[in-house]
Amino acid sequence: MQGVRGKAAKIPLLDEIMDYVQREINHPLILLYQSILHLLKNPTENAYQVLKAKALNLLHLLGEEEQHQLWSTLLNLAWFSMPDDLRTREFFSVFQIGITRETILENGLLDPANFINFVDIGCALQEFDAVREFDKKYAKFLNTDETTKKNINTLKEAFLLFGEGKFEAVPSVLEYLEYEDVSYGLRAHTLMIKSIYEAK
């Protein structure tokens, strides 16, 4: 701002905000967000697990929207903090937290990406009952149009069939998929190729 105007600009309430932060520096939520920043700079499995425990203990202090945002943050932090061999199981664990504490919904609706990601992860871990229970409970909250809901249901069925070893049935199910979403198309083609290979 100083470089643009040629003089220092006074930011409204900046002094008051800084004074408040200094006074509340030991507030648990401020410490939590500081831990998130530290983890972003130096991601490790141990630091992530410590942060996750802190976040779950403080979840009740947040409103519904902030709870969903913190849950989404944990999911993203797991991606680059966990080792490859543990990452998928940790994703499933964080999703289960979102389901149990109902933080997976945002304004009462479910992001289609989160729905299909849970299905993908659950089937990869052979948690088929959990996937079907999730579908039964949350499909009605999908935040999308009817055509996309049908595509998501088709992909879900294909993932379940593949996961349960019913490879020959996968291609016929995927025939009903409409390729309006690139990510759905990529997943469908991957499942199709893997199914044909496994069925041989």
Image: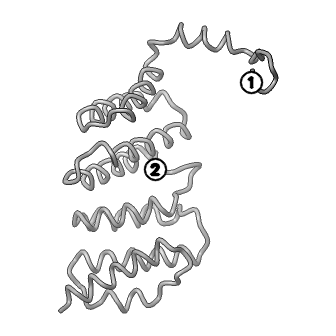
- Look at the image and tell me in which quarter the C terminus lies: bottom left
Numbered label attached to residue 104:
2
Q: At 26% from the left edge and 51% from the top edge, which residue is drawn? A: 87
Closer to the camera, 155 or 76? 76
- At label 2, counting other C-alpha atoms closer than 10 Å, the crowd grade (few under 14, some 14-19, many 20 or more) is many
Q: Quadrant of residue 49?
A: top left
Q: Image quadrant of residue 187?
A: bottom left
Q: What percent of the width, then of the height, locates residue 75?
A: 39, 47
Q: Secondary structure at mark 1?
A: helix
Q: Is residue 89 above or below residue 122?
A: above
Q: Nearer the viewer, residue 38 or 192?
A: 38
Q: Which residue is mark 1?
A: 3
- Which residue ends up furthest to the right in the rendered image? 5
The N terminus is located in which quarter? top right
Q: Earlier in the sequence, mark 2 or mark 1?
A: 1
Which amino acid type corresponds to the residue marked 2 in the rendered image?
Ile
The answer to whether residue 5 is left or right of residue 70 is right
Task: List x then y, in percent, for residue 60.
Answer: 45, 30
Residue appearing at x 43%, y 42% in the figure: 71
Q: Nearer the viewer, residue 100 or 192?
A: 192
Q: Label 1 is placed on what type of residue?
A: Gly
Residue 113 on image: x %, y %: 48, 62
Residue at left offset 45%, top offset 45%: 72
